[in-house]
Amino acid sequence: MQFDRLLTNARLATMVPGGAAYGAIEGGAIGISGERIAWAGPMAEVPGEAAVTENMDGRWITPALVDCHTHLVFAGDRSDEYERKLAGEDYAAIARAGGGIRKTVEATRKAGAAELAAGALSRLDAYALEGVGTVEIKSGYGLTHDSELAQLKAARGVGLASGMRISATLLAAHTVPVEYEGRSGAYIDEVCIPLVREAARTGLADAVDAYCEGIAFSPEETRRLFIAAKAAGLPVKLHADQLSDTGGGQLVAEFGGLSADHIEYTNEAGIAAMGKAGTVGVLLPGAFYALRETQRPPVEAMRAAGVPMAVATDANPGTSPLVSLLTAANMACTLFHLTVEEAIAGITREGARALGLAGEIGTIEAGKVADLAVWDIERPAELVQWIGKRPLHGRILGGEWL
């Protein structure tokens, strides 16, 4: 076997389940051909030679990190809401008074494509420093046909500019815009469903999301949207059961959804349905923390039901102003009682699964894309333990150093 690049003298956290913790291989090596991993295993078993051999000097290598839930394309500022929440107002009250998502919608509609892309790129800089290779970016701050498509185009553009893999999600059903006040069903039918068809036709979206909640869209409205998405060939995911039990976990599982996100109030039937459907539970501790929530996601029930658990930042200008995936992993352990291994799996293997990319990224094994992060650490737990520390030595994306 002839490799283009061979990484030697490394400690591999392959994150392949079923063996040692972290799928660890001490004294490991990775052979890369083109953009893909051709072989990974112990150095003593390397089955060939390479055009370029690089000594990793005992550094740990993990899959490049995956943030499977962000809202990074937006304009405007909502730091005033932070002060209001500190003074005692809750998010639902702020949203009903014209704040929250609607405030960002107003600013985003006024912004040009260049401004939206520039803002998103500046936020992605923080991710690059933490070994992230894939980021999901949702629309949902335009809420009109043209502005939603502009957000999706900006998301695609920042992928090209940053070198990261960007998974773009259509979230037109994020909240009801002011022009459709009291007519949420009409907004779904007249704006969201046509947008689903357009995004699928143009290839601008990889999935469709919705916010199923009392302050947003009903289960029945969400169901209509999901039927349209499946007809257009797009997978679905859901902001589910964040503030109340709307049956969101069960609803998205019914459609074979990629993920149910937030899920603080998801009931036992929803968790069981997610387990049967293979729907990933995406934990968003940044929003839990910022909103001072007390209802934790049902982690023990998800473990028992075999629900895969991913961890993401939910980066957005209001309810989760967090652009550190490593901090999100720390918070998932501290606030939600994940183990360190579960948290690292949540920002690698299960994050990839939540995006429908488990066959491409998220573990170190032959056939996967060579998206890797190389770390100056002694143990994988350091990645989660420290807050604010960035021990990244470098990233390899698509087989090349970035």
Image (cartoon, rainbow, N blue to C red):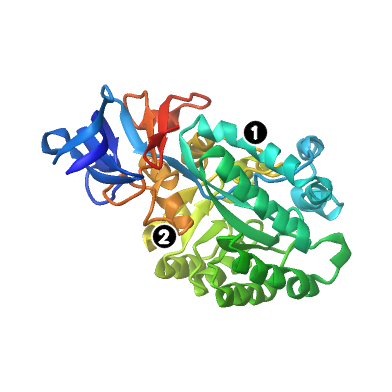
Using the image, determine if residue 292 lies above or below residue 55: below
Using the image, determine if residue 363 lies above or below residue 149: above
**Which quadrant holds the N terminus?**
top left
Residue in the image at 26% along x and 21% along y: 57
Question: Local crowd at mark 1 within 10 Å, few (<14), some, or many (≥20)?
Answer: few
Nearest the camera: 94 or 118? 118
Chain-order first, disc 2 or disc 1: 1
Nearest the camera: 269 or 215? 215
Which dot marks residue 301? none
Q: According to the image, label 1 marks what residue?
A: 122
Q: Is residue 236 visible?
A: yes
Instruction: Find residue 333 and report its horizontal and vertical position in percent.
Output: 46, 39
Question: Local crowd at mark 2 within 10 Å, few (<14), some, or many (≥20)?
Answer: many
Amino acid type assigned to the residue bearing label 2 in the image? Val
For this view, does 93 lie left or right of residue 281? Answer: right
For this view, does 257 lie left or right of residue 77? Answer: left
Residue in the image at 24% along x and 33% along y: 51
Q: According to the image, label 2 marks what residue?
A: 307
Instruction: Find residue 197 and report its horizontal and vertical position in percent.
Output: 65, 71
Using the image, determine if residue 305 lies above or below residue 154: below
Residue in the image at 39% along x and 63% along y: 305
Give the SS element for disc 2. loop
Q: Is residue 143 visible?
A: no
Instruction: Find residue 347 and report its horizontal and vertical position in percent.
Output: 45, 44
Give the SS element for disc 1. helix
Instruction: Find residue 397 and report its horizontal and vertical position in percent.
Output: 42, 39
For this view, does 38 lie left or right of residue 106? Answer: left
Residue in the image at 46% along x and 66% along y: 274
The span from disc 2 to disc 1 (Cα, nearest Å) is 34 Å
